[in-house]
Amino acid sequence: MARKTMDCRTMPSDSNCTVQISGEEDEVLETAAAHAVAAHGHTDGPELRDGLRAALRDEEVLLVDDGSFVQLIEFHARDLSGFRATAEQWRERMGKETTARWGVVAADRDRPDTYVELVGFPDHDAAMRNSEHPVTTDFAKRMHEVTEGEASFRNLDVVEVLRM
């Protein structure tokens, strides 16, 4: 079961509350209801709990700490669907063997058909194990087939994480 999260910053509040709660669904609902009553003056009951349940989201965490490693890959593609399909095949084939923790694909607003993929790893050694895996080698070949030109890579050591 996916962990759930509730973030007060996503709901209207006179106090501009920044509390975020995460855990199993029933735990989050109980804690969020107690918080809504104690901190926001709501009355506990079915209406409050239905509203809270509707506001629950799957927890999506980008795990990154000082000492982590991020690889930045810039590539060009007229149609991103080929890249998406190739990346999904890689994820399925790698399964639990991947050392990547997360990935983000972003479109460059100033350069059409230009994308950047950020992939996070616990450290450089984990990234290199991932890169040397035969499935990743095959992914790199397939990526070249669905993108234009050579992809460029930047290897980045995380020196500081700023929590916002």
Image (tube, helix red, strand yellow):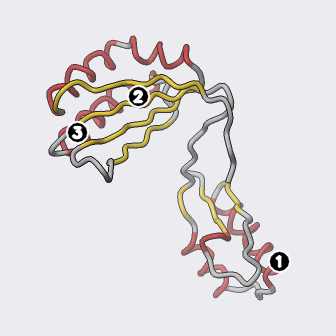
Find residue 95 and name its label: 2
Marks 2 and 3 sit apart, C-alpha to C-alpha, by: 15 Å
Q: Residues within 10 Å of mark 2 (few under 14, many from 20)?
A: few
Give the left or right position of residue 96, taking residue 37 as reference.
Answer: left
Marks 1 and 3 sit apart, C-alpha to C-alpha, by: 46 Å
Numbered-mark total: 3
Find residue 85 and name its label: 3
Where is residue 142? Give x, y as percent. 20, 25
Where is residue 154? Give x, y as percent. 43, 25
- Residue drawn at (22%, 49%) of the image: 112
Tell me which corner region of the image, top left, top right, bottom left or bottom right, holds residue 162: top right
In the figure, 110 relative to 18: above or below? above
Q: Secondary structure at mark 2?
A: helix
In the figure, 96 relative to 64: above or below? above
Q: Check whether the beta carbons of the residues at disc 1 and disc 3 lie within 8 A of each other.
A: no
Front tag of 2 and 3 = 3
Which of these two is toward me, 147 or 99?
A: 147
Q: Secondary structure at mark 3?
A: helix
Residue tagged 1: 39
- Label 2 or label 3, whichever comes before in sequence order: 3
Q: Quadrant of the C terminus?
A: bottom right
